[in-house]
Image: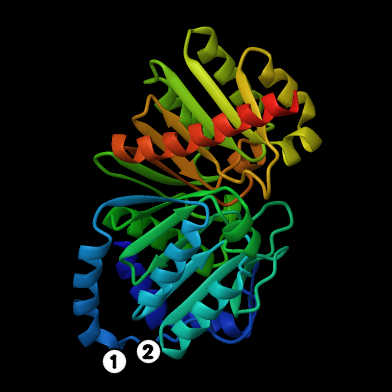
Amino acid sequence: MTPYEIWGIIKERGVVAQLGARYHGTVEVVGSNPIDSTSGSIKLPLLFIFLLFLSLAFAGWQVVFDEEILSTTLSMIESARWEVLMVSFGVDHPEVIEALKMAKRRNVDVCVVTDDRAFCSLEHLVDAKPDSLMHEKWLLVDRRVALVSTANFTYRGLKEDRNVALVMDEEGIVDALLEEFINFSKGLFSREKTPVVRSGKNWKIFFAPGYDPLLEIVRVFEKARWRILLCGYSFTDPQMTLLLKLLASRGLDVRLILDAHWCERYAHEELSILRSGLKVRTFDGEGILHAKSIVVDGKWLILGSANFTRSARFKNDEVVVILEDEEIAAKVEKWFMEIWEKLHEKACIAE
């Protein structure tokens, strides 16, 4: 049975609607019913036209950076005709909130999932597990176009911080996100949820903690021949450190940009080890470096919500996409190198 069929059964039986009146597992529904299971029937005449439009506007893969993620997010929400699913640690950007409210006024089914430690003024499902975070960051519109991001849908995440996001209309990606959302609608988070993984000709998507991000990263690193460029917010995983140092010792050009605000405060020891044998620069500009991305040999891109920590591997709800696409990888590499060079220039001025 496909995720589409499973989702149809869930809506038909009112499982999601029932969440509006009570706790379901570790999920708390804040506000009224997030999904009206009877509202889709009157929208079918518009659906075909809209899907045709999307096939022209969002064909293939796109990568967007920093404040572009906000405009892309708003455009996707505004184009929704019958359903918007949003998952993020927090959702508080005023323009995003207003776009979601406007979508609801158009009778679009809107459902938001956040962590209970974050704020969201909309009705939403909440992951209230105390020992893990709802850390995934993605948006799915009309089960057709998806955005997987390193940014939370917050004012800081979409306005101030450095982030990267992928936009795609791959059917397998949509299936995977729907299947993961079904986990959440059943109150299944972290290690309790059903593991989800999908792959295509040149891509793979998976969700932690059911799948260990480091093991998937290793499979890409095994193909590396000359360069690894890594962006990270929090970095505390000694196994990842060992792996990068091993690759550097074999002659690979390994470069890291890490957020200074987090790493120098909470991971000073790991940062010192990384700096011994690796090319490391720390970002201490306006906002924070919140991206979690790796470009390998200008060919592979690894991107998602998972930081380079053991919590991301074994506790938190995380999403990661691996893509083999030289054009997309080149754009992320260009973004990385622009930050890299600016940090060098800043260091020279300071000296």
Q: Secondary structure at mark 2?
A: loop
Residue type at the position of mark 1: Ile
Task: Name the side, left or right, on which 161 lies relative to 51.
Answer: right
Residue at 62% across, 49% down? 316
Q: Secondary structure at mark 1?
A: helix
Residue toward you, 202 or 103: 103
- Look at the picture and state if 222 lies above or below 314: above
Residue at 36% across, 35% down? 330
Task: Name the side, left or right, on which 308 lies relative to 144.
Answer: right
Residue under circle 2? 39
Task: Name the side, left or right, on which 76 lies relative to 291.
Answer: left
Q: Position of residue 123 (x, y in %)?
A: 60, 80
- Look at the picture and state if 64 lies above or below 85: above
Farthest residue in the top direction? 250
Residue at 29% across, 58% down? 169
Q: Are marks 2 and 1 in contact (CB under 8 Å)?
A: yes
Which image quarter holds the N terminus? bottom left
Number of the label disc, if any, that sits on residue 42: 1
Label 2 crowd bin: few (<14), some (14–19), many (20+), radius 10 Å:
few
Q: Position of residue 320 (x, y in %)?
A: 47, 45
Label 1 crowd bin: few (<14), some (14–19), many (20+), radius 10 Å:
few
Residue type at the position of mark 2: Ser
Quadrant for residue 306, please give it: top right
